[in-house]
Image: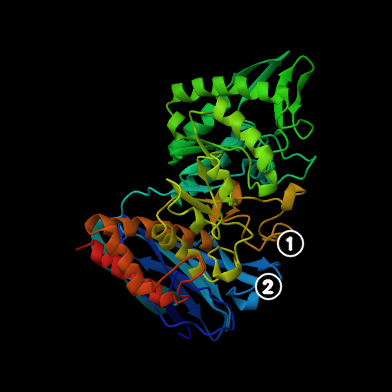
Amino acid sequence: MSVRVTILSSLEKIFPGAPLPAPHGRLALLRGERGSLQFVFVSEEDVRLTVNADSPLPCRLFAVQEVPVGLAIYENARNCTLLNEGKSGDYPDLLTPFEGELTVKAGVPAVLWAEFTGEKAGDHAVTLTAAEGTETVCAKAAVKVSPTALPPQTLRHVNWFHSDCLATYYGVEVFSEDYWRIVESFMRNAAAHGVNVLLTPVFTPPLDTEEGGERPTVQLVDVTKKGYTYTFGFDKLDRWIDTARRCGISYFEISHFFTQWGARHAPKIMAQTSAGYRRIFGWENDSVSQGYTSFLRQFGAAFKDYTDQKGITDRCLVHCSDEPGLKDLPRYRRTAATLHEYFRAYEHIDAISDYDFYKEGLIGTPVPSLQAAPTFAGNVPKLWTYYCCGQYNDELPNRFIAFPSIRNRILGTLLYRYDCDGFLQWGYNFYYTQLSRRPVDPFKETDAGGAFPAGDAFVVYPGKDGEPLPSLRQKVFFDALQDVAALKALEAKTSREHVLKVIEEELGEISFTCYPMDNERFLAFRERVTEEAAQ
């Protein structure tokens, strides 16, 4: 047979015409950990293969598919390693469930992604067999599973869940049974990939919305307005929380009580009134107006009663406003004071990169960007950090489609290095353009209408019948989260000082802007962590 098969690590991205990297046909996992390899098929002629996996471990196969990238990175990028020179074009990203037959075109690599679960300890041989008629070709990989179990994830991870995007893409009515079915499928996928803090739209989140515009209403709390008195119904919120818990979610991130980038307005809030169901708060309402403050006072009391009864008060995080700047400090003081008064029972969290906000006591859990995180490290009791479209220069980790996977994977080791309690990213499934001006087809527009580097806005694709399709970026990011847990497993056997020494010996003095861009070096480091954790 003219077909050749090469096994590569999950950190490679394969482009037609580019030489294949050196083979890497082994995995070292802690028990219970998931890990992946890639099987690359190259043929001198067009062939259609039947492929089977013989694995003593649970194994899922996906076909790696390319997606179009328009905006790979912003024009002002500097000190920024990119694939394919950051050009627009087709890049590998989408993973679709493999159904047994693989078409390999002459000279064009076809890639299968194999994800293994380290269910049982030992040395395991895995064989992939490809057949065309009576001719076969085999590729063999080795998966070693440690008897030491991967500990549960303790890092809190938020990846903003946009249920309105699901309703829009699939054309279903919000809160219909189809909506709930699709939401549950995507929640399950998110939880299976390390999301344990779920953005919960108590009111429609005032995020990525053009001033004066609206996103579809996904408000989970029913509001009835009689004069200046409000009553609240929590049936939809109850279903949301029960569904999320069933999927494996542990914490609930309550959507922002004030608009993004400065807390100047109230979010969109709908209510039953004497004039019917209508918007009672929104862009037209100043954030510190007497009317909206009175509403928050009444809602805060009712919400506390609800979360106490539900047993989740200590599992809820509340937001004031996303990404305020120093110019917004006077307004933020006033809105934060409102939250401190009426929502004092909850952890207060916001994406804030200016230390003055924390120094003044306005925020309990600030979430600075990667660049700003070192300023907060050691000065806050719980360090979080985040990245979004703005973290790309100076080799900052991120998961854009045009980035090499090591810039995605290294984040986990850096989160351990800085002893982070949490990580936030804004785009689990944002299928609109910037400021939600129109919907996009994420299979055709991966850059939110040319606004953000491709891949910034989502890590899952909307598959048929409401089933999410993963991306290889989502799998690599989950590996990074597992790296945090693996490092903690080694710490439990030794000490934090020892783990930091291992990191330094294998990777050098790393920071958010300095780490080796070397796949094999990183994989050797991770193998050492796994081996030492087993001793």
- Horizontal relation, residue 277 to residue 232: left or right: right
Residue 210: give x, y in percent of width and height.
77, 45
x and y percent of residue 85 in the render?
A: 63, 78
**Where on the picture, by quarter, is residue 57?**
bottom left
Task: Name the residue carrying label 2.
Answer: 89
Report the side of 188 relative to 219 (left or right): left
The residue lying at 30 percent from left, 66 percent from top is: 529
Above or below: residue 431 compared with residue 280: below
Where is residue 103? Give x, y as percent: 55, 73
**Rendered image coloring scheme:** rainbow
**Would you identify the image quadrant in which residue 116 lies?**
bottom left
Specify whether 154 is left or right of 183.
left
Decide if residue 362 is on the left or right side of residue 264.
left
Residue at 52%, 41% in the rendered image:
198
Quick check: 108 above or below 377? below
Q: Residues within 10 Å of mark 1 (few under 14, many from 20)?
A: some
| Residue under the image location 22 percent in, 62 percent down | 534
Answer whether residue 35 is visible to the viewer in this image.
Answer: yes
Q: Which mark, by number, is residue 131?
A: none
Please name the amino acid that badge 2 sits on: Gly
Residue 450's disc number: 1
Indicate the secondary structure of the residue bearing disc 1: loop
